[in-house]
Structure formats: structure tokens, C-alpha cells
Image (cartoon, rainbow, N blue to C red):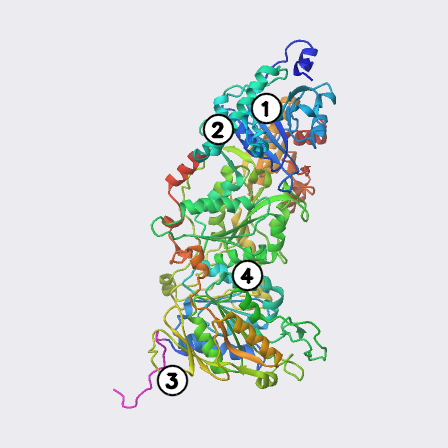
Amino acid sequence: MSTTAVPPKKVNRIGLEVLNYKGGKTTLCAGCGHNSISERIVEAFYEMGIQPWNVAKFSGIGCSSKSPAYFLGLSHGFNSVHGRAPSVATGAMLANRTMKGIIVTGDGDTASIGIGQFVHLMRRNLPLIYILEDNGVYGLTKGQFSATAEMGSKSKGGVVNDMRKIDCCLLGIELGATLVARSFSGDKKQLQGILKTALHHNGLSVIDIISPCVTFNDHEGSTKSYSYMKEHDLPIHQVDFVPYYEDISIEMADGEVRDVEMHDGSHLRLRKLGRDYDPTNKRNAVRLIEDSEEKGEVATGILYIRPREENFFDQLGLMDAPLATLPESITRPAQSALDMVMEELR
Amino acid sequence: MSTTELTPVGSRQGGTPKKTVNDFSIQVATVNGSGSQTSNTVLMRSIFQMGIPVSGKNLFPSNIQGLPTWFTIRASKQGWVARKKEIDFMVAMNPETAKEDCLSLQPGAAILYDEPLKLNELRSDLHFYPVPFDKLVAPVCPEARLRKLVRNMIYDGVLAQLLGIDMQEIRNALVKQFGAKKAKAADLNWGAVQAGYDFAAQNLTKSDACVVERMNKTAGKIIIEGNAACALGSVFAGCTVVAWYPITPSSSLVETMIVYLKRLRVNKETGEASYAVVQAEDELASIGMVIGAGWAGARAMTSTAGPGISLMSEFIGLGYYAEIPAVIFDVQRVGPSTGLPTRTAQGDTFSNAYVSHGDTKHPILFPGNPEECFTMAIEAFDLSEFYQTPIFVNTDLDLGMNNWMSDPFPYPTQPIQRGKVLNAEELERLGGFARYKDVDGDGVGYRTLPGTNHPEAAYFTRGSGHNEKAQYSERPDDYVNNMDRLSRKFEHMRTKVPAPEVIVNPKASVGILCCGTSLHAAEESRDQLRREYGFETSYYRVRAFPFHAGLEEFIDRHDRVYVVDQNRDGQLYSLIKLDSPPHRIAKLRSVRYYGGLPLDARTVTDEVVLQEGL
């Protein structure tokens, strides 16, 4: 027996190292906000002890949609077609409801070509994490404005955007998403808390993450640059998450936190910062987003949550076992059933 | 004007006309939304119940209420079920079209009509049967608001008397139509049928030749629409995810499927469903869900028509390239664009074979009758999962939405084939896998399903270039190797897809070739050519694309092969040409019909006669 103690490898509650949650080497630009988001996803899934091979990652087309290759390398991934990740994810989750699903898209995917699918995904409240890596610009085609770019913001070439923007969080709240959050790729702690909450949410989580494009949208006049966000980001609370398997009677005096119990007994704790904010009230959420915008601020945090809403699986009366692997004895009715139907048609 | 004052054609020509037994067509002209569907179904079913082969075709507008619609019933002792071009007996219930309906008839045909229309003043070479519908309906239906719906039942009674349909069979068909729960409605309608019968017995003199006589040719048979047959096939294929968007003429496929799924695929104790049906926001989403579900291991399908396929084309290309099973029912209607949404065609034969950008090709199954809708639906799921690729089942409005006689469907004899899927134990033994490697020489790789409990199970699926290990690649050799494997896979299907139906006639130097519903006209046309012209033909019915190797042999055996298409451009003809060397192409001839009505035998016969110079 050696006397020099080898430090035990750090593992999570299912015995995996953080290495098991990493993906391939990123091919995005150095400093791209999307890379920070990938890192936060790795940490959140690792810390929550999610089995990587029971995760399905989905994306559309664009810089953001490349990123599922750069996290959770042991998870199944599907880089589909532009704007259509929601339908692919819907089908896959129906085939196997036991999986954790995560969609990563960009603002081109979400607010333009795929807005129809985004809207209907929210109506269905499918248990799924929807990440919008929002930089206001089409990066992969070299710098055109997207539909989330602020009116009046400037492109790298000096062109001023004269179109109104689409606020995907407002849209989400309006259309029935049951968890709506906004964050900034540079806010490590807040984003981690939001992701952890989303992992325990039994419905659709829409997370709009302002993620500056260092190549085409990180200049003076852009409202989705690092410097703009550092000046205008107004975190409404700090997001802590206490999973159901941890002792919840920790820290914090009443009055400083707002505690939301999730469907599985986990607790979302919103540590009060600037104001006392109730994220379970739809009108509050809409008002907060609109007031902040008027003041030239970007409110970040969990803007809206309804943790116990009926989800799409419940609505469909779906069985618990994955449909994908049901045996023939369940999926093919017996000969007597066919005989009965034939008799009726005589 | 008294009905007895009419001079029937037959008596004017002297003598009683000879009887035409169990071989005629009836066309009922009505207004859609007037409840005529019930009287037409009852009429058709009562003839069927008398043991006489029968077919029914609904020619309807793209509209809910108020536009002209025609229902054609053909009785044929020989069992011909294609549309008959000539109408022998017209029932003119629509004042808007009555004049045209009357003038369009061939001399010697019969016409039953609402007396005030005075159609007998238009021409004198028909058998006229005026019926005062309003006078007859009032006493049997005291409630005025129901009269419009009951009125049409009167012609069933009149026809029963004139044609010799057993009234008990009409009664039985009515009871079947309304079910035990709506006995009151059945009785009300029965009253109208009787009023029609009694009126005809007392006031009309039979002068035309059409009669029915009991036969025994329908015993054990069922009546069903092709869409319902596809739906049942999918239920028994073990389909687990359905995503769809409503479109004529395919909507009733999924709607019927939902009914059967609720009955047959819900656990009676727990109430839990072994399936999911999603009405998507559009066809882009419905095929996206099917691709996602197929990727994750569900048996997934959608049902649509041409405009839907156009929207789905991007995803179908992804399914082809990323190799994902998906079953797509295409109930074809007349295009291009919106086209004639309620008329039939085989207009997607070519486009479905090659839909989506880049080099793509897709298998297609061509059912020609309801039984094949059922069996091919099951085969489609097995083939799609084995070959890991989207597959089309091309039916059409004629097959999908019309009522067809059929033998009862056979219960599948083979277990469900899920294809090459590696589970956790196999992954453990193999120590991993390469998703797109051609291990078995058939071009088909092994796949894993998301959620498989093994760290080596995952791979990254993409529509961008990839190598055998599913890694992103833009290398020319990776691209070429992959595309060549996909071609090998497609070639491998030739012997696995449903085999053709072939009749080689040793006396024939000419063959007739068709697919799908053209079979009914083609069969009858061959009979016409033989009887009327002494012209013998061989027969080849394509049941799938890629084509079976037997097609080459068939072309080689004959001097000329007539390829029958229900589209303007000869799409099946073109597909065969693409697959054939010049000496075979030289033997091909094209027969095309694209008027939107179900293909009739006479059209095929006339074209062959013309081209052969018979």
C-alpha cells in the first residue's frame, strides 16, 4: 500500500466525472458566447447527475446549432434542418419520454425561419429545454441582422436596423411556455442556476441567452455585445437551485428569498436582488420585460414559471414506457381484433 | 304532366327492350351537403348485399355545401370495378346541373328526375322517370327541417322498384348505416324509401333495360375505403407515432386511424395509450416529428397529399441522407399547385421517387386495392426500418376516399421487423460501432436508439457530410463512399419490395403495364381488347419502386409495352425509361389520362387501339 495518497477522482452522484460530460473541440470563434453556454450546460448536467446517454440534443442550422457537438459527447445528437429542431425533438421525445431533451438554436432558427415551430412547441408544453443562443445576427452567413436585433442597432458594416425586434421571452409567456428565462452568456452563476432549474422542470423551458457574436456583433452600436450587456444587464434575482435529493433546509432567512417548489419536490430559490419579484404571475412578467426595455435595461433571471402545469405527455395519455421499444404484444393487436373489424365491414 | 303520357323509347321502337342484368352504372347528381351520401351508400350496399359486385365513386367539389356532386355506382356481374365511362341510369337531383346531366347522356339511357325540372322536354331518346319529390316527402317527414335530408332517400325506393332491388336489403343497409342507436332516423328514412317504391309501382312504367338479379359473388367480402385500409394496416403494423396535417384527400386516413387506435391500442385497465397522434401546425412539422420519432426508434408515419409532399421535401432529404425510417402515405390528388383537390391522379409518381435536393431516391409502394393498402402499410413500416430510409405509400383519391369491395384483410404472418438495431449488450460485446459502416454488404448500417443504456451508444446525426463513424466530414472520399453505399442500399431493395403482378400471355406480343388504381381499368381494357378486337395482351403491374428485375424480362419478351399513367407527363413511363437501356426504351409506349376522374377501361382500350392501328 502506497503511502502517498492519490486524491480520489471527483465524481457526481451517479459516479461520473465532468470529463464524461464534455464534447468535441469547438470550431466556433474564440470568445464566442456560445462556447460559454456549452460550458454551463456541461456543468449543470454534471452537477445534477444526469445520465449522459439518456440525453438527446437537438439543433437546427447556424453557429448555435453546431454547438451540441461541443458538449455532452456521450449523448445522442441530432443536427437537423434550419428552424425545425422543435418538430424533430417533439417526435423524438414522444418516441422516448424517459429521455432528457435539450434543443440549442439561434435567433435565425427561432425568430425567423422556425418561428412557427417555436410557437407551437410552446403551446404543447413538452418537457424539454429550449436554449436560444441570441446574438441578433446571422453569423454563419457573415453578419446579416436577425429578427431579434434591436431597432436602431448597427451592424458591423454600419447599417442601421430599421425593423422592430421579436422578443422571444414575451412570446414564450404569451404562448404558454411554463418556464421562461433570460440570461447572459457571461453570467456564469445565474445561467447555471437557470439550467439546473430547467433540468427539473416538468414542461417546456425557454431560455433566451444573450450571447455576443465576437466577429459580427461585438462593436459600438450593437445591443448584443459584451460591453452593452455588462452595462445594461439587470439581474432581477440570483437563481439558486436545490434538487430534491439535497437537504433543502439550508441557509437564507425569510424575506430574502422567494422559494418555488417544483413538481418533483426540488426547490427553486430566487435570492432577492433589486426588487421583490413574483415569477409565477404572468402579468408581472410581461410588465417587467416591458418596463426594463423602456429603461434601456435587460432584465435577466427566471422571468416566469408555472411548475405544475399538465404537459404534452399527460395530455396524450401516453404510457410511461418508451414507445420506441414496446414489444409487439403491445403494438400489434391480436388476430381477434382484426376479425372483429372485418366483421363490422361486411 | 302525367307520367303515363310519356312514350318510352323502348315501346316506340317496338317490343320490350332486352334486359341488362347486373351490368350498368347509375349516376346520382346532387348538391353537396344535402345528405345524399347516406342514400347513395345505402343504394350501393343493398346491391352488394344481393351478391352483385359493385363499386361506388364520389365525384365531389372542394367545398362543404351547395356545389354539384355526383355519385356513380357500377354493378358488374363480371366484377369490373373501374369507373364506367357511359352512364346507363342518371338520377338528376340537382336543378343546377340537371339540364347538362340530361344532355350528356347517351341515347337509350334512363333518367330519374324531380318532376318540375321537365327534363323530358329536352330530348326524346331517353327513358324518363319523373318523380314529384316534394309531394312525396311531406307526408313521410312531418318535420319540415328534416325534409331536405330525407328527400334523397326517395330515389332509393324508386330505383329499388325500377331495378328490382330487394327492399329487405335496403332496409338492412339502412340499419347498418344508422346503427342501433339511431333507430328513429333509420325509420324516418325507411318511410321515404317506401314512399318512393310505392310511387314507382303505381305511377311509373319500366321501359329501360337495367335490372339487378341476385348473385353470390360478394359473400364474405367487406366494403371499405382505401384510407381506412391504410389506417388499419398502420395500426396492425405497430405504428407508435403519427404526426399529420389535414389535407384532402388524405385526412380521413389519420382520422380513421385515431378511431381504431382508441379502440385497439389503449390499455383497458390503465387507460394509457401505446401511441401518440399529433396534429401538427403544418407539413414541415408533421414530417419533422416523424423523422424525430423514427430516429428515436418509434414506428412513425404521416399522411398527406401532393402539396404536403412539396413542403416536406427538405426533411425527406434529411431522412434519406441521415438514414432515418419514416412512412409517408401520399393520397394523390390533381396538381400542380392547389390543382383539383377533390379529383384523383397519379401525379406524384415521379416526384416522390426523387423528392428533395441533391442525389436522392426513395422507395415507393403502389397499392391498387384496399387489401394491398393494408398489407403494404405493414410492409412499408418493415422496409422503412430495415433500410433506415423514408418510404412512400402512393395511393390516390379514387382508392383512398371511395368505397371498394374487398376480401377481408389477412392477419400478418410475419413478426414485426425492426431492422438492424444494436442494444446495450451487443454494444458491450462489440465495444462500440460505426453508424454508417456497411458491415453486411447490403448498404445498411447498424444503428442505436437514443436512450440505450450504454456509454458507447451515442452517435451524432446530421444532414451535413459525414463519414462511417457519423463524424462531420467534407472529404471527397468520405462523401463518395457514403453516396455509393446509399446507392447499393437502394439497389438491394429491388428484390425486397413487393413483387409485381405479372401475367405473361403466350399469344401476346404486346404488354400493358400500370401501377396503383390503374389496375382496374387495365384489367377490363384487356378484356375489351380481347372480346372486341381479338387482341391478346400480357400484363405487368408494378407494385413498388425500385422496380423488380422482372420488368426487364417482361419488356424483352414483348414487342411493345403500353405504360398506363394517370398524369399528363407519363410519370411511370418516364421512371421506367430512366431505368432502361435504349433498346428497351424503344419498346415502351405511353397511355395517359389526366382528367381528374378515376381511369376507365375505354380510355385505355381506345388509346391502345389507336396506337396499334387495330
Q: Nearer the viewer, mark 1 or mark 3?
A: 1
Disc count in the image? 4
The residue identified by callout 4 is A120
Which residue ends up furthest to the left in the rendered image?
A: A1
The residue identified by callout 3 is A253
Residue B210 % position (x, y) = 60, 19
Q: Secondary structure at mark 2?
A: helix
Horizontal side of residue A146 vs B234, given as left or right: right
Residue A346, visible in the rendered structure: no
Q: Secondary structure at mark 1?
A: helix
Horizontal side of residue B422 vs B359, given as left or right: left
Q: Nearer the viewer, mark 2 or mark 4?
A: 2
Give the answer, above or below, for where B426 lies relative to B58.
below
The residue identified by callout 1 is B136
Answer yes or no: are tags 1 and 4 on the same subunit.
no
Residue at image point 37% right, 69% down: A264
Q: How far is disc 1 from disc 4 in space, using C-alphas?
A: 53 Å
Q: Amino acid at mark 4?
A: His
Subunit under mark 4: A
Q: How far is disc 2 from disc 4 in space, using C-alphas?
A: 47 Å
Answer yes or no: are tags 1 and 2 on the same subunit.
yes
> Does the CB distance between marks 2 and 3 fall below 8 Å?
no
> Does the CB distance between marks 1 and 4 fall below 8 Å?
no
State which region is magenta.
A1-15
Q: Amino acid at mark 3?
A: Ala
